[in-house]
Amino acid sequence: MDQRKTISDSELRRVVQSRKQPFEPAFMTEKIMREVRREQERMLRRERRLFFAPVVVATVVLLALGAYAMVHSSQTELTPRDEMASMLLVGFYLLYELQRWLCKKWNIPE
Amino acid sequence: MTHHDEQRLIRKVLEGNAEAFAPLVERYSRPIFALVVGIVGRREEAEELTQDIFLKAYMNLSSFRGRSAFSTWLYRIACNEALSAVRKRRKRLSLFDFSPAERLPDSPDEEELTVLTEAQEEALLAALDRLAPDERALVQLHYYENRPLCECGEILSISESNAKVRLHRIRKKLGLWISEKQ
């Protein structure tokens, strides 16, 4: 046979399409959807953690900031209220960044 | 299922309705399985990979921007996963690499085998399994799935002209292997 002969496009297509693999669509769909549902459960649990974690962290952080503000205000010219306000702003910004980071980490749309 | 139907289902999935993913799975599970089994060559592995591919698609659906068709995006994931699995498995290299076919000069008067005998057809089926995984991916996409070259290129992250050249080389290589077998 002449070595320069190339398989024609149409013949290759015909032979490739003649190869059939047995496949059970219903069984495969059910298997996949089982995994999808499991993943959905995992995502919901992550979202619940994502909601409660900042609330817990916020409480701790604000209490800590409040205590610091009360102690620190005696050493500066600012009133305790001003100290607390500036600390709260910093605190809220940190919480916002924390939530963004958690959303990215757990692949949850913000 | 139209493009509009797919977009509607994707929106529902992203809103939290996982069951809306089922029609997409039903629509694409068979062609994705056929593509994957064509690349990895093992049925059981292909079944597991098909599952992983759809799960990955579901988990990353929010990253699908709609710039390409959903099928193109899904096929891209499938090819990447299948090729990655083959690389990990360190499958046996093709006994004949690109070199023999590349050394054959491209001739405008190149003859083509337009009708195969039964023996040649059997030899061709065996030769297809000897192709490199990325070559098998291209063959499956273009000849089994009937995807146009531009789409094959998009799925495999190569240019359309590159896909055309590769397919030509694959056909030449297969012709060479069949002739060597006889």
Image (cartoon, coloured by chain):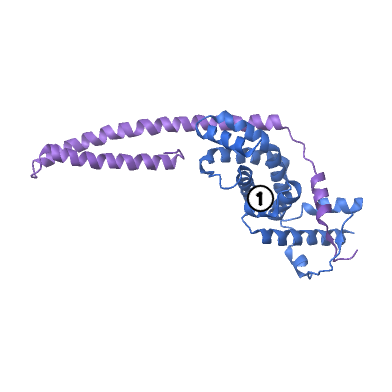
Chain colours: A purple, B blue
Q: In the rendered view of the protein, which quadrant contains the N terminus of chain B?
A: top right
Horizontal side of B72 relative to A53 (left or right) equals right
Q: In the rendered view of the protein, which quadrant contains the C terminus of chain B?
A: bottom right
In the rendered image, which residue does mark 1 sit on?
B86
Nearest to the observer: residue B90 or residue A24: A24
Q: Residues within 10 Å of mark 1 (few under 14, many from 20)?
A: some
Residue at figure coordinates x 71%, y 57% from the top left: B93
Residue B94 is situated, as x and y percent measured from the top left of the image, at 74, 58
> From where the camera sits, is residue A90 visible?
yes
* Residue B46 to residue B136: above or below: above
Nearest to the observer: residue A83 or residue B1: B1
Residue B120 is situated, as x and y percent measured from the top left of the image, at 88, 54
Q: How many marks?
A: 1
Residue B104 is situated, as x and y percent measured from the top left of the image, at 79, 69
User: What SS does tag 1 mark?
Assistant: helix
Residue A97 is situated, as x and y percent measured from the top left of the image, at 34, 43
Residue type highlighted by circle 1: Val
Which of the 4 image quadrants contains residue B57? top right
Label 1 marks a residue whose chain is B
Nearest to the observer: residue B82 or residue B31: B31
> From where the camera sits, is residue B90 visible?
no
Residue at figure coordinates x 61%, y 35% from the top left: B5
